[in-house]
Amino acid sequence: MVQPLKDMKELLIGNVVLLGEVPSYAGTWQSDDEMGSIDYSVRARFFADRLTELGVDECTTDPIGNPIGIIKGRDPDKPPILVCAELDSLYNPAGDIHYAVSGESIVGPGLMDNAIGAAAVLSLPDVLRRLGVSFESTVILAGIANTMRDSRNLVLVDAFVEYLGVRPAAAIVVKGGELGRVNYFTEAVIRADIVCDRNPEVHGIQPNMIVVANEIIDRLLALEIPQKPETTVNVGIIRGGYKYGAPATTARIGLEVRSTSNDTLAKLLAKIREILELVRYERRVNVDFDITVELGAESLGWSHPLTQAAISVLSALDIEPGVYPSVSELFYFLKRGIPAVTIGVANGSDYHQDVASANLASLYTGLAQLVGLMMMVDGEAIDARE
């Protein structure tokens, strides 16, 4: 399939650029049903309109604004194949978004995470038609909106799955990169903000909140972290203060804790809460612990037919599989017993910068991988969780 996909270069570039240059933030538009005016993602509306242009049999949006396209299969009794992608991008620059095509590369903000992944799903109606590929199963193409705008919004994926109203035979989650990734299991993860600020009930001089935050970080780094089950604690964000010459009145720590064990994560979380309570009382300050994401550890299993199908497709393309855990949408499918994997469709760089780039040659291979995996799901008894 790779060579015929190369011949579709203009279609693929067009969909990537058109979708990527549409802002992924929310906007208000009038829906066609009784719900009236609702905040939907601008990119989600474009995704739905473009699916209709490219010839899906049906196109609609669910109650939370996620666009869904239907390609009807020959056997309406078979459970459908769900192919979905996040529509948002973590990097949202101020002002207009511009993509550039140079040789075999596309460059632009938000490209790899996740404009090119969403564009790959968006291109499927035309790609399947040009390749002459059809399915026994109905194919559901979906864009999931608003999950990156705020980390706590990831739970919207759970609502999306609930609103589907049907149990797919399998779900394929499509990311921009990297080509070769196969995520079939998830880690337990907590993402949280630790906010330190002054206690209004304490009179007199209070400590610099950056110093308080530093004390918390020191205590977090002193925790004994087990190597088995594999567990990590990462301080990814530190913010505080408002000018050079004044003590900071607030400080925020962005924390992520991961583990392959739900029990280990729960025990570590309890120790973190003890540290925060200790600092709060000893330093007489307010310390809030705001959990924004809480996911569990789930696994489809290495020997599951869907996992093995994903591996075999990569092997046929001479691509070394990259197996590692996911901490995003995959969890919400696996926890409901829906066989699911996450794959990447392109190689790129500088994911979260305005000069993010993707290699076009890798996209042709990535789309061949996606179509091949869909064909294997359609032709084999994938819907049999271990």
Image (spheres, helix red, strand yellow):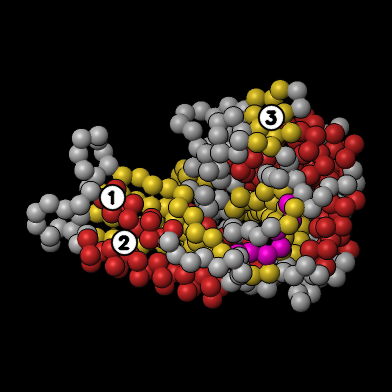
Q: Contact (CB < 8 A) between labels 2 and 1?
A: no
From the viewer's side, name the closer residue of 194 and 11. 194
- Give the label, 3 or 2, closer to the camera: 2
**Which residue is found at the position 56% from the left and 38% from the top?**
352
Question: Considering only vertical position in the picture, is 101 above or below 245?
Answer: above
Residue 321 visible, this orientation: yes
**Which residue is found at the position 53% from the left and 53% from the top?**
147
Q: Secondary structure at mark 2?
A: strand
Q: Is residue 184 magenta?
A: yes
In three-dimensional space, the C-alpha distance between marks 1 and 3, rounded to whole angstroms, equals: 44 Å
**Which residue is found at the position 74% from the left and 33% from the top?**
359
Badge 1: residue crowd in 10 Å (few <14, some 14–19, many ≥20): some
Mark 2 highlights which residue? 288
- Give the label, 2 or 1, closer to the camera: 1
In three-dimensional space, the C-alpha distance between marks 3 and 2, rounded to whole angstroms, equals: 43 Å
Instruction: State whether the magenta stretch is mostly helix, strand or loop.
Output: strand
Image spot of residue 358 (x, y percent):
69, 34
Region rendered in magenta: 181-188
Rendered image: mark on residue 211: 1
Q: With 23 as the anchor, is 4 left or right in this view?
A: right
Badge 2: residue crowd in 10 Å (few <14, some 14–19, many ≥20): some
Residue 164 visible, this orientation: no
Q: With 314 as the anchor, is 57 left or right in this view?
A: left
From the viewer's side, name the closer residue of 125 and 228. 228
Image spot of residue 149 (x, y percent):
48, 48
**Residue type beneath disc 2:** Asp
Q: Contact (CB < 8 A) between labels 1 and 3?
A: no
- Residue 136, image quadrant: bottom right
